Amino acid sequence: MLATDDYSNEFKIEFTQTMFLEKRKREFYPGSLIINEKIVAVRSDLEARIILAIRNAAFSPKIDDLDKSLITECLEFVLSDNYVTITKKFNRI
């Protein structure tokens, strides 16, 4: 997802897949939240700010309801206990 803040700074936000819980070469850890190609620390201030920004975002009309639903699902996952469990599996916390 590409995002722009109030100062026109652009950000690339990604949620990595959670189906295959194996780290592969040149890929981010499964279940990671990524901003500008960097893993966001679990339960960090940055993670909280990203979640809040996405929740309060004004989405482009080009984003359909299915995409919005997928984004909401990803946010719910990041806030879940399962997210913490997966990150512990990869020694990220």
Image (cartoon, grey):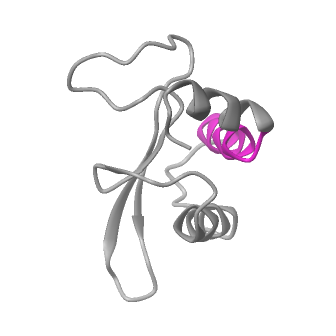
- Residue depicted at 29% across the width and 26% down the height: 27
- Residue depicted at 65% across the width and 34% down the height: 66
Classify residue 30 as left or right of residue 19.
Answer: left
Give the residue at the far left of this rendering. Answer: 26
Labels in figure, total: 0
The quarter of the picture where the C terminus appears is top right
Residue 43, compared with residue 64, is above or below; it is: below
User: Residue 29 location in percent, x, y?
Assistant: 41, 29
- Residue depicted at 57% across the width and 51% down the height: 42
User: Residue 44 location in percent, x, y?
Assistant: 58, 63
- Residue depicted at 64% across the width and 66% down the height: 48
Residue 67 lies in quadrant? top right
Residue 74 lies in quadrant? top right
Question: Which stretch did the figure color magenta?
Answer: 66-80
Q: Main secondary structure of the magenta part?
A: helix
Residue 86, compared with residue 39, is above or below; it is: above
In this view of the protein, which residue sits in the foreground, 48 or 86? 86
Give the residue at the far bottom of this rendering. Answer: 7
Q: Is residue 75 magenta?
A: yes
Classify residue 24 as left or right of residue 1.
Answer: left
Classify residue 40 as left or right of residue 56.
Answer: left
User: Residue 77 location in percent, x, y?
Assistant: 70, 37
In this view of the protein, which residue sits in the foreground, 68 or 85? 85
User: Residue 10 location in percent, x, y?
Assistant: 31, 70
Residue 69, compared with residue 79, is above or below; it is: above
Q: Is residue 33 magenta?
A: no
